[in-house]
Image: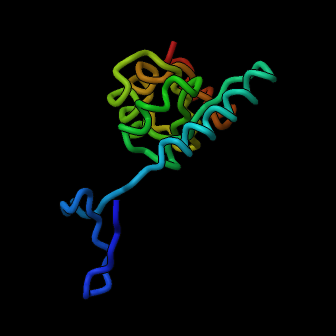
Amino acid sequence: MGTPMSPSGELKATKNGVALPSPLLVYDWASIEKKLRLFKDIVASVDGTFLYSIKAQPFSGILTRMTPWVGGFAVSSLFEARLVHAALKTHTEIHLTSPGIREEEIEELASLCSHINFNSLGQLARLGSKIR
């Protein structure tokens, strides 16, 4: 894939001489997989769970491809939990940690997430009974 500069100074991506849409995100899956394999081996050696925080990269195509390499996903909002749940369409661990859990969202979060980590004892007291 070439990325020649246009006269205006913008990068123009092409594949086989055909212009690709812009904006365009290009992932080097071999590099990503190499790092995922390394993390998976490290986590296995300590009997842990590798959670990928979707804050770093929230695109469903990559999340789907990562699924075999990770133990689950870390989210910090209802939006992120919905995104992971919709993208994967399979049961996977989804861990929520957020100081700002809204009372009106807790039931849906509980239905989407396998784990909810409360940020304080006050948050647990206020919302914990709503997820049982």
The colour style of the image is rainbow
Task: Look at 25% across and 87% down and name the residue there.
Answer: 7
**Figure label count:** 0
**In the image as oriented, which residue stretches furthest toward the right?**
46
**In the image as oriented, which residue stretches furthest toward the top?**
132
- Residue 111 horizontal side relative to residue 69, left or right: left
Q: Position of residue 119 (x, y in %)?
A: 65, 37
Q: Is residue 13 above or below residue 52?
A: below
The residue lying toward the viewer, choosing from 13 and 114, is 13
Q: Is residue 86 above or below residue 76?
A: above
Task: Look at 38% across and 25% down and name the residue there.
Answer: 88
Q: Position of residue 80 (x, y in %)?
A: 42, 39
- Residue 59 horizontal side relative to residue 117, left or right: left
Q: Quadrant of the N terminus?
A: bottom left
Quadrant assignment, res 79? top left
Q: Position of residue 127 (x, y in %)?
A: 53, 27
Q: Is residue 31 above or below residue 37?
A: below
Task: Look at 52% across and 44% down and name the residue there.
Answer: 100
Q: Position of residue 12 (x, y in %)?
A: 28, 71
The residue lying toward the viewer, choosing from 100 and 93, is 93
Task: Look at 48% across and 49% down and name the residue there.
Answer: 28
**In the image as oriented, which residue stretches furthest toward the left?**
18
